[in-house]
Image (cartoon, helix red, strand yellow):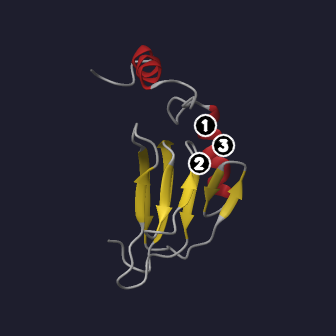
Amino acid sequence: PLPPSYTCLVYVRRGPVGVGSPGSQTEVPTHHLAYLAKGPSAGEQVTLSALHSEGAEVLLLAGEPLNEPVAASGTWVMNTQQEIQVADRDYAMGMMGVPWDHELSDEEWQKHVQERGIMNG
């Protein structure tokens, strides 16, 4: 269970999944994000359910809101415009790893990463 003060993001890598309280779920398709602005009230649950027999794969991110300044540009979200400029520079210099092509299968992605010497075994 998550504390009621937490915000929560659910990214569906493979799905679809149902997100919400039992009996009133919202379908979230593959490669989509569900944003739960506030955790459940006392006694409530948020349930994730695979909607197909093949199952589902999700990334759940949750935490206490930081209540910090937000600066955004394109896909960058930082605290200041200066941090965004640093991120742009670092990205242009190739310092942020290998981009992920969501169209690749798991096997193709693993091969892609191994060819670049980023992953062992």
Q: Earlier in the sequence, mark 1 or mark 2?
A: 2
Front one among 121 and 103: 103
Rounded to the nearest angstrom, the CA distance separating label 1 from label 3 is 5 Å
Q: Tag on residue 88? A: 3
Q: The N terminus is located in which quarter? A: bottom left
How many other residues sit within 10 Å of disc 3, few (<14), some (14-19) or many (≥20)? few
Q: Residue furthest right?
A: 74
Front one among 92 and 5: 5
Q: Tag on residue 42? A: none
The three-letter code of the residue at mark 2 reads His
Residue at x 51% of width, y 46% of height: 16
State if disc 3 and disc 1 touch (CB < 8 Å).
Answer: yes
Residue at x 56% of width, y 73% of height: 68
Circle 1 residue:
91
The three-letter code of the residue at mark 3 reads Asp
Rounded to the nearest angstrom, the CA distance separating label 3 from label 2 is 25 Å
Residue at x 40% of width, y 64% of height: 47
SS type, badge 2: loop
Q: Position of residue 75 (x, y in %)?
A: 67, 48
Q: Position of residue 6 (x, y in %)?
A: 44, 74
In the image: residue 101, left or right of residue 120: right
The three-letter code of the residue at mark 1 reads Tyr
How many other residues sit within 10 Å of disc 2, few (<14), some (14-19) or many (≥20)? some
Q: Tag on residue 32? A: 2
Q: Residue furthest bottom?
A: 42
Rounded to the nearest angstrom, the CA distance separating label 1 from label 2 is 24 Å
Residue at x 44% of width, y 80% of height: 5
Quarter residue 70 falls in: bottom right
In the image: residue 1, left or right of residue 24: left
Q: Position of residue 43 (x, y in %)?
A: 35, 83
SS type, badge 3: helix
